[in-house]
């Protein structure tokens, strides 16, 4: 049977663009449909603008640290509209680069919403239909707001936070996950008075407990007011535009903005997937097999819409693997167990593999190595910053099961630890590696004796 196209990709975000480009380069006739801006969440309202704002926020610490190194810095001031405009220029450039790369690959971009109307049929918002040998659902995810909060329409999600028309002097961040922590940390440094509330008893559920404690302490040092075990119950808009928020613990807050970052849900609503034979999980995510194919053999899914590991490099790797498998020489397997992730607070938290608690639940003989120290820079700056590093090791095989780093530059460090762990590194490999001095990372190769809980968190080096 002849099809209009070999590959119809819905969504030009991280996963969709990579899959479309690779498929087109393999010679497949490819169309990608995008309803918004090319580049998707990561480029337009996720990783990239977020990291630019994190950089902006850290000048606050640099100005404060400078005096200890002999500098006199005048009273710094910050201009929010200038940052927003600079960010906009950069993401516009990136989006254009994505578009140019798509064009260069030979894939056709159609800027419209698309949905599935059959196992091998797609319909555009214009009504035009295409038959396709394979369909890829790469539609990503969207922020979910809390339910049952009166006045929630006055709150914003991370989508709107990047382009606020005015800078919120007082900000309430709701949520304890990585996006909430990052926004609380960066807005506090840019000059907001931030309160962060969450249902959980601590930030960053799922991360190693020592690191969660370290992040909580760093947030508090930066001035973020943290409240655990509570959520907003009512948000009221006052005549002057400020928001009055009633919290479930009985407190009331006056703020300029409420940012809800409590989670994300896959974009599958109204896509026609179930009618086309695609099974979704209870959260609405597309269920895929290890080859990234859904329960309908001609329909595939990658990235956030599958709601497994919601990170850009994962969506990209999956897009590449799928296109290679369908149209190329076959795909290399994706190593999901050694995917590192970073929380871009200040300092950063980089993590890979198992936390101490996860490892202890799965392995009978777990050794933990820890370092908790004052970074060299903090000695002269006088800041209260601490660095925390932890290796979780299978005592029976000596294999590294997890690595956790809370320190300046942790994102850069954990990427390289990920290479070692992907190669199956053991603690003995770390021990045999000569340190780079003076760095914070050298602590990773100089932790000699397993941590004993009686030692009160002091590093082993
Ligand atoms: C605030 C924030 C910070 C983040 N920070 C990081 C980070 O530091 N590191 C990291 O790795 N990840 C980060 N992420 C996660 C990352 O952005 C996502 O995992 C990644 O973008 C997922 O890629 P994707 O291709 O699955 O979806 P997306 O990039 O979201 O792309 C999906 C695209 O599909 C389009 N679309 C949806 N439905 C349709 C339709 N019916 N028709 C046509 N087009 C459609 C959308 O408009 C969108 O452009 C962050 C996310 C957020 C929200």
Image: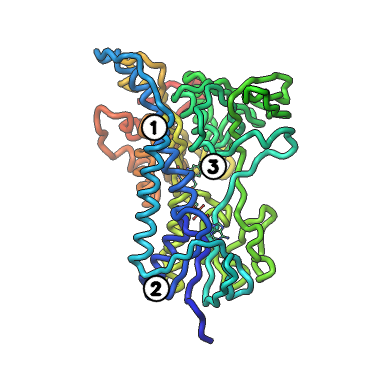
Q: Quadrant of the C terminus?
A: top left
Which residue appears at 59% of the width and 33% of the height? 259
Q: Quadrant of residue 324?
A: bottom left
Q: Position of residue 226 (x, y in %)?
A: 58, 23
Foreground mark, 2 or 3, reads 3
Q: Mark 2 — residue? A: 328
Q: Mark 3 — residue? A: 159
Labelled pair 2, 3 in contact (Cβ < 8 Å): no
Helix, strand or loop for disc 2 = loop
Colour option used: rainbow
Which residue appears at 39% of the width and 65% of the height? 21
Q: Cβ(mark 3) to ligand 1 < 8 Å? A: yes
Point out the residue furthest to the front here: 239
Q: Position of residue 300 (x, y in %)?
A: 55, 67
The mark that comes first in sequence, 1 or 2, is 1
Q: Mark 1 — residue? A: 82
Helix, strand or loop for disc 1 = helix
* Distance of label 2 from label 3 (alpha carbons): 36 Å
Q: Position of residue 415 (x, y in %)?
A: 37, 44
Depth check: 79 or 191 in front?
79
Foreground mark, 1 or 3, reads 1
Depth check: 418 or 124 in front?
124
Would you call the spot at circle 3 few (<14 residues within 10 Å), some (14-19), or many (20 or more)? some
The mark that comes first in sequence, 1 or 3, is 1
Labelled pair 1, 3 in contact (Cβ < 8 Å): no
Q: Is residue 73 left or right of residue 304?
A: left
Point out the residue furthest to the bottom here: 1
* Distance of label 1 from label 2 (alpha carbons): 45 Å
* Distance of label 1 from label 3 (alpha carbons): 19 Å
Q: Position of residue 451 (x, y in %)?
A: 46, 28
Foreground mark, 1 or 2, reads 1
């Amino acid at each position: 049977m002849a099809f209009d196209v070999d590959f119809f990709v819905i969504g030009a975000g991280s996963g969709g663009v990579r899959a479309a480009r690779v498929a087109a380069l393999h010679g497949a006739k490819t169309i990608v449909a995008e309803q918004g801006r090319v580049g998707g969440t990561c480029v337009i309202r996720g990783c990239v603008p977020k990291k630019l704002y994190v950089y902006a926020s850290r000048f606050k610490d640099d100005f404060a640290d400078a005096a200890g190194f002999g500098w006199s810095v005048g009273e710094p001031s910050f201009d929010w509209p200038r940052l927003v405009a600079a960010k906009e220029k950069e993401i516009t450039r990136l989006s254009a680069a994505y578009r140019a790369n798509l064009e260069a690959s030979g894939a056709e971009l159609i800027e419209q919403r698309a949905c599935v109307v059959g196992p091998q049929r797609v319909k555009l918002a214009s009504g035009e239909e295409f038959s396709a040998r394979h369909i890829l659902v790469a539609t990503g995810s969207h922020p979910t707001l809390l339910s049952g909060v009166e006045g929630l329409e006055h709150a914003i999600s991370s989508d709107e936070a990047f382009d606020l028309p005015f800078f919120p002097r007082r900000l309430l961040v709701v949520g304890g996950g990585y996006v909430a922590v990052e926004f609380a940390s960066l807005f506090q440094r840019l000059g907001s008075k931030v309160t962060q509330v969450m249902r959980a008893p601590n930030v960053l559920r799922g991360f190693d407990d020592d690191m969660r404690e370290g992040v909580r302490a760093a947030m508090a040092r930066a001035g973020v007011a943290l409240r655990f075990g509570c959520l907003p119950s009512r948000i009221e808009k006052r005549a002057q535009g400020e928001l009055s928020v009633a919290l479930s613990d009985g407190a009331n807050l006056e703020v300029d903005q409420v940012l809800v970052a409590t989670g994300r849900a896959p974009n599958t609503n109204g896509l026609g997937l179930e009618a086309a034979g695609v099974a979704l999980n209870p959260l609405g995510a597309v269920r895929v097999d290890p080859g990234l194919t859904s329960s309908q053999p001609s329909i595939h899914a990658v990235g956030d819409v599958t709601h497994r590991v919601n990170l850009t490099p994962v969506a990209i790797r999956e897009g590449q693997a799928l296109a290679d498998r369908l149209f190329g020489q076959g795909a290399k397997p994706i190593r999901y167990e050694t995917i590192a992730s970073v929380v871009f607070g200040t300092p950063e938290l980089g993590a890979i593999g198992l936390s101490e608690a996860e490892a202890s639940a799965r392995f009978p003989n777990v050794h933990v190595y820890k370092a908790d120290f004052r970074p060299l820079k903090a000695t002269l700056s006088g800041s209260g910053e601490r660095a925390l590093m932890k290796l979780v090791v299978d005592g029976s095989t000596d294999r590294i099961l997890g690595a956790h780093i809370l320190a300046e530059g942790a994102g850069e460090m954990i990427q390289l630890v990920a290479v070692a762990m992907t190669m199956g590194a053991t603690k003995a490999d770390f021990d045999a590696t000569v340190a780079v001095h003076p760095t914070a990372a050298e602590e990773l190769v100089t932790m000699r004796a397993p941590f004993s809980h009686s030692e009160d968190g002091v590093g082993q080096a």
